[in-house]
Amino acid sequence: MIRFFRKIRQTFLANNTFSKYLLYAMGEIILVVIGILIALQINNWNDQRKSRLKIDQILKKVREELALNIHYSDDVTAFYRFKEKDIGDVLRKKVTLEDYENSGLVYLIWNNTTLDLSDDTARELDSYTDLLNKEQDSLIAKINRLYSAFKPTLDVSDEAIEEAVLDFESRIKRTTSWYYLSNNRENLPKRAYLFFLNDTLYLNDVAYYESTGLNNHFKYNAFFNSAAKDLYIDLSNYLKINVDSTLIKAVDQFEQYQGTYVLQNQQKKDTFIIRKKNNKLVYDWIDRGGSDTYSLYPENKDEFVLVIWFAKLVRDENDNVTGFKLTLGSRPEQEYLKIK
């Protein structure tokens, strides 16, 4: 090819056709420039492809990190579900001396759990602001919104519940004579059980534990849990990876959840409609202020979180769902009947 162009130049020069040679030379320059531009564009496309593949690799790691966060979040939910009835019973003074003597109730607010939300891998995406395709850009925006919305609040809530437990233990250590026996419940003297039954400051401690734990820590965890599972599904679909069934249970297991539920309280007109949408459960929350739709992720056959309440299905003797109950510590229980 180079020899071909050289012969053309020599012909123009030998025939003294300078003007034609000049046009030819300009054409040759244009061809070279076009070739360079094409090469640069190909190189740019290749760089974009490599960058997008790299982003997909990071998104896979983000999905793995998110899955761990969801597991920890589910553990937080299970922790508070285990405690919330006892918290309510203590604050309503429904427990007896025998309850304290024959169970682990004395340790009700002596421990805590934290989420310790991790976003290390997600923050790697901050350096990839260019060369994104539309789906990647949308997913990264969702990831950033999730962690920016919940991590600061959950970090503060983690610290608050830890501090509440430490403050309580510090008070017990300073003011009781039996604290040194507290690591072995079986050796606690009767005065210790009477302390938990009668001490009004202990009721204050339980109330603060409820406020810090159930009403804040659990609440923000519940909001994060639902949003994180939504994002986990989106990431799994984009990456064409099967959803982990230990995180997101198959919707077909929960057919009896579906239906319309109304509150048994004439003062309020709340209605929940649980239905299937895009192969997952959602609920429409309808009240006097309007209607909103949220995702619903059941924990098992009967238990789930609804907004910021612990919910449990009510069944009849034939195992058919007739409604559900909402509880949260010392708050009044709410019962909804299934009408269709």
Image: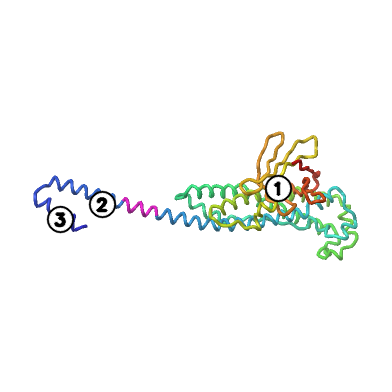
Q: In this view, does 158 lie to the left or right of 64?
A: right
Q: Which mark is residue 219?
A: 1
Question: Looking at the image, is 287 positioned above or below residue 220?
Answer: above
Q: Main secondary structure of the magenta part?
A: helix
Instruction: State the extent of the magenta-drawn residues as a range.
Output: 37-45
The 10 Å Cα crowd at callout 3, few under 14, some 14 to 19, many 20 or more, is: few
The 10 Å Cα crowd at callout 2, few under 14, some 14 to 19, many 20 or more, is: few
The residue identified by callout 3 is: 7
Residues at badges 3 and 2 in contact (C-beta under 8 Å)? Answer: no
Secondary structure state at the residue bearing disc 1 = helix
Percent coordinates x, y for residue 207 in the rendering: 80, 48
Percent coordinates x, y for residue 311 in the rendering: 75, 48
Marks 1 and 3, Cα distance to the nearest angstrom? 82 Å
The mark that comes first in sequence, 1 or 2, is 2
The mark that comes first in sequence, 3 or 2, is 3
Which residue lies most toward the front here? 318
The residue identified by callout 2 is: 32
Instruction: Evaluate whether residue 201 shows in this view.
Output: no
